[in-house]
Amino acid sequence: MNATRTTLHRMAATAVAGVALGLLLSVGPALAQQAKIKVGLMLPYTGTYAALGTAITNGFKLAIDENGGKLGGREIEYFTVDDESDPAKAPDNANKLIKRDQVDVLVGTVHSGVALAMSKVARDNNTLLVIPNAGADEITGPLCAANVFRTSFSNSQMGIAMGKVMAEQKKKTAVTLTWKYAAGDESVGGFKEAFEAGGGKVIKELSLPFPQVEFQSYLTEIAALKPDVVYVFFAGGGAVKFVKDYAAAGLNKTIPLVGAGFLTDGTLEAQGDAAQGLLTTLHYGDGLNNPKNIAFRAAYQKAFKSEPDVYAVQGYDAAQLLIVGANAVKGDMSKRAELVKAMEAAKLDSPRGSLALNKGHNPIHDIYLRKVEGKENKVIGVAVKNLTDPPRGCKL
Ligand code: PHB
C-alpha cells in the first residue's frame, strides 16, 4: 500500500469513528434510559430463614409484575445472592452485587447481623438499600442514612407491643427466651421495657446461639421458674421447632407462651395443633379486611400457589416503595436526591394497612394483637396504633 492510500484509509477510518462517536453521544442518554435497572436481591435461600427469603422474593416480584415488570418505566434485571444468614460472609456478598454486578439498588435481608454489615457496605458505596425484613434498631437509628430504607419493622416494636398487652392483662412475672443476636436482644429489650413500665417484672432472660434449636434445658428451666408468661423471639424453621417442643413438654397447658409474631407467621402449616391459641404481636395479620390485603392475597395465591405471610408483604412493600421513587425520577436512578425525597414522602397502600416512614426511614404502622386459630393468625385487636420509633440519634 502506498503512502497516499494509507493516509486516505486513516482519514476515512477517523471520519467513521467520529460519526460513530457523535451518534453515540447523541443517543447516549436515551440508551441509558432504556438499559435495565439492576436489582440485587441479597437474601437467605438456605438455612432456618430460607422460607423467609423466598417469600420476600415472591412478594417483591409480584409488586413489580403488577407494575408491568418495570421500575420507573425501565425493565429490570435481577441479581441474586444467597446470604445464608451468615454475617461473616455479608461484606463479600454485598460487595459482589455492588462492585461486580453494579446493581442500582440492593434489596435485603432477613437477618439483622447480615443487614448491619450490608448497610455499612451500602453507606460506604452510597448504594441505595431497601431492607425488607431485618429489624436491627440501629440501622434506622444512630446508623440511619439517606440511601437506606426499611419496609418491615424495627425489632423492639413487636416487644414493646406485647409488653404493653401483657402488663394490661395483669401478668406479673415473665421469662424471656431468644436467639442471642441483635434481633432477639432488641425484641426482648422492647418487651422488658414496656412490661416493666406497666408494672410487670422480667425475672429471667434466657438465650441460645443462632440458629441452635436444642431447647430442652431451657424448657426445664422455664417449668421450674413458673412465670406468669413466657415471651420469645424465634422465626422460620427454629420457630416451628420451638412451638412444637413447648407443647410436647406440656408447657402450653400451664404457662402462656407469647411472642413477636414471627413465631407463628409462615409456620402454622408445620406447627399444627401445637400453635393453637398462641398470642403474638405483629404489623400484619392474614385476615386483615382491607381491599389491598384481599387483592394481594388473591394475587399471591394465584402466582405462587401458596399463602402469603408477613415476609411476602414486606417484600411487596419494598418494591412498592422503589416504584414510588423510580417513578418520581422517571427511571433515572442517578437523580438520587429526588428519588430519596419521593421515597421519604411515600404513603403506601400496604396489605398491612397504611404505611409511612419516620425520619430514620423506618415504618410507622399499627401493631396488631393476633391469636392463632386453625391455620390463621387472626387479628383480635390493635396492640399499638401508629407505632413509630423514637429518633434514637438518627441525624438525617
Ligand atoms: C432479624 O434478624 O432481624 C429477624 C429475622 C427474622 C425475623 C424477624 C427479624 O422473622
Image (cartoon, rainbow, N blue to C red):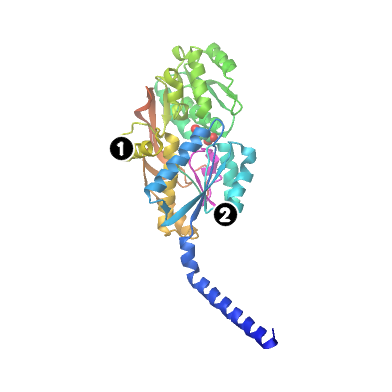
Residue displayed at 42% across by 17% down? 273
The amino acid sitting under disc 1 is Asn
Q: Magenta span covers which residues?
A: 126-147
Q: Residue 367: x, y in percent?
A: 40, 33
How many numbered discs, if any? 2
Residue displayed at 56% across by 13% down? 220
Q: Is residue 236 above or below residue 68?
A: above
Q: Residue 61: x, y in percent?
A: 43, 44
Residue 364 in sight in this render: yes
Dot placed on the residue nearer the N-terminal end, 2 or 1? 2
The amino acid sitting under disc 2 is Gln
Q: Residue furthest bottom?
A: 4
Q: Is residue 289 above or below residue 375?
A: below
Residue displayed at 49% across by 33% down? 51
Q: Which residue is mark 1?
A: 290
Q: Nearer the viewer, residue 4 or 74?
A: 4
User: Is 330 situated left or right of 123 in this image?
Assistant: left
Tell me how far mark 2 sits from mark 1, CA to CA: 38 Å
